[in-house]
Image (cartoon, rainbow, N blue to C red):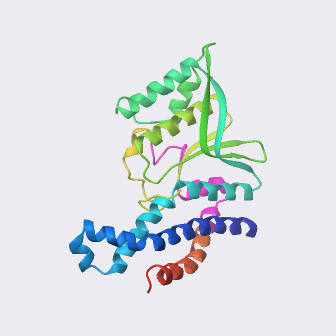
Amino acid sequence: MDLETKERIKNRIREKTDRILARRIREFDEDMTELLVRNPFGARLVPEEIWKGSKFERSFVTSFGQGVYEQIAYEIAIGSEATAQNQHLENITINTWQEEAINNLLDDQRRNRGNTPNWETELESVSNLKTRSTIDVTILFDLYIKRTDGTEEYYSIKTVKPNLDQTEIAKRDMLRTMTAKPDSLAFFALPYNPSGESKLYSWSVPKKIFDMNNSSAVLIGSDFWNQVGNDPNTYLELLQIFDELGDEYQAKIRNDYLNL
């Protein structure tokens, strides 16, 4: 990443973190009043800074969600000289047999019927269905990238523990897209692995829909960021950016919010 890209990413992170910190400071008295009602014994026994830390952590995880990661990924993509767009809507055309097969497949997987998910086999099976009857559908992806060589990439970026509905919707649009545009790439992407980088992904819910640890359509952590950046060093560079901002914000949070 060049310096300009890194600075744009820092600005995205600062904007969100400043907003979270300001809200927590502004709402703290109300939070403590509520806590005294909900947990009258614990609120009197446990130090205030512990409750503050817990509240901030929950607020951060909720607010610093996939939206920020979408924006960071956008900055990385355009920094790689690609064109990109967040919340990309597009109309495509597939045939009615393909649409029916996609819906039946996902219904079976939700109900734990059929075989273990296999992206390549499923995509081939759907793509091979032929009929003259067609249907126009609208797809939505959190990030769209068009590379300098014309390659199009579509990303559904989800929270690290996505629910079943989110996962099903993402896979439906991914199958539709690669059926209509076989030269494109579509990915189900998570910004990091909650089990730890390089470990097996263990959250069970999306495993009904995707083979989370083996599918080429699933990108988690470094695989996701390096693909977006078109560079094997992107993930490490992004961690360095967070390290640099950590020096700034850890001191600010301790001083302004925790009053330490």
User: Please, which residue is most extreme toward the bottom here?
Assistant: 260
Place of residue 6 in the rendered image (x, y in percent of width and height, measured from the top left): 69, 68
How many numbered badges does the structure rendering display?
0
Residue 180: which quarter of the image? Answer: top right
> Which image quarter holds the N terminus?
bottom right
Place of residue 125 in the rendered image (x, y in percent of width and height, measured from the top left): 53, 25
Can residue 205 be seen here?
yes
User: Please, which residue is most extreme toward the top here?
Assistant: 132
Residue displayed at 44% across by 64% down: 59
* Left or right of residue 71: residue 55: left
Residue displayed at 42% across by 52% down: 161
User: Please, which residue is most extreme toward the left here?
Assistant: 41
Place of residue 131 in the rendered image (x, y in percent of width and height, measured from the top left): 60, 14
211 part of magenta stretch: yes
> Which image quarter holds the C terminus?
bottom left
Q: Nearer the viewer, residue 42 or 37?
A: 37
- State whether residue 66 is above or below residue 17: above
Residue displayed at 57% across by 44% down: 187
Residue span colored magenta: 210-238
82 part of magenta stretch: no
* Left or right of residue 148: residue 248: left
- State whether residue 118 is above or below residue 197: above
Residue displayed at 75% across by 51% down: 82
Can residue 230 be seen here?
no
